[in-house]
Amino acid sequence: MSDAKVRQLEIMACKARMGVIEGTFNAKSGHPGGSLSAVDILTCLYFSKMNVDPQNPKDPNRDRLVLSKGHAAPALYAVLALKGYFPFDELKTLRKSDARLQGHPSMCMLPGLDMSTGSLGQGISAAAGMALAGKLDHKDYKVYAILGDGECEEGQVWEAAMFAAHKELDNLVAFVDFNNLQIDGTLDEVNAPTPLPEKFTAFGWDVMEIDGNNIPEILEALDRVTANGKPTAIIAKTVKGKGVSYMENVCGWHGKAPNKEEYDIAMAELNDELGRLGGK
């Protein structure tokens, strides 16, 4: 991957973070912390890896994305808007009662969504089902899922992991957004599901560990996914609230929207970063 391509992805990720802030500020609610941590993964998938077409969002041969940590919908919406599925300005309608951009993804309301999610643990099961359907239909599309680290405390995650390995779903790639914070504190304070690499390995998955806010590392990991009869788990260490100084590694920003002063600070920081990247 060329330096120029990496820089373009970094610019796109910065713009997506601005979309997260725009959406949650206008909604006066939402989940900015875990959305910001997942932005780089989503940006790499939609702008470098996945076979998708905003003009044909139901293409049966498209790659699929399931946001199992559905509360991070502001990040997915921002990336979908940048990709061209709907106008970027529509992000301001997040969580409005008559809007297409609900608090958690609803595939019945918005183009580009492959699964309605929100109940933690269920998205990865749906992704495994999609991957199995692809195998049965002799299709070559891939299914990508993004889980939260706290979500991995759900037993259903491990039932899906067992199923995916048993069915040899090497067309399934699961990212774990490992920012080490959930709504009530750190993983250790709540109910740590660690060590995740060893657990996924024991369940029969190929496992990688990366910096999930480092675009070259994300791209390299995606390039290393192979069709070897095993699903792939990518444990992506991230920073909750990444890109906004006062949100980074602060548990309280799991489910709280910025006020006007906080919005202005966040957007100023992100505009500065966009300028540094040459995105203006």
Image (tube, helix red, strand yellow):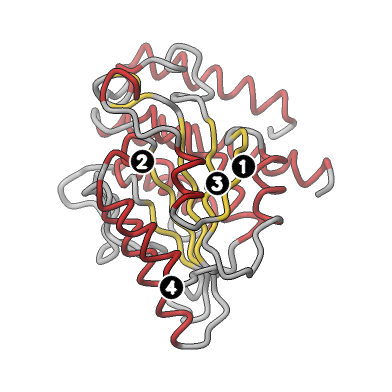
N-term-proximal mark, 3 vs 4? 4
Looking at the image, which residue sits at the far left? 97
Name which of mark 4 and mark 2 comes first in the sequence.
2
Q: Are there few (<14), some (14-19), or many (20+) residues within 10 Å of tag 2?
A: many
Q: Position of residue 17 (x, y in %)?
A: 50, 33
In this rendering, the label closer to the viewer, 2 or 3? 3
Q: Which mark is residue 12?
A: 1
31 or 189, which is in the foreground? 189
The numbered dot on residue 234 is 3
Q: Amino acid at mark 4?
A: Lys
Q: Residue at x 46, y 61 (%)?
A: 85
Q: CA distance from mark 3 to mark 4?
A: 19 Å
Callout 2 amino acid: Ala
Name the kind of residue labelled 1 in the image: Met
Could you tell me which secondary element the residue under label 3 belongs to? strand
Q: Answer with mark 1 or mark 3, whichever residue precedes in sequence.
A: 1
Quadrant placement of the C terminus: top right
Residue nearer the viewer, 65 or 11: 65
Observer-side mark, 1 or 4, equals 4
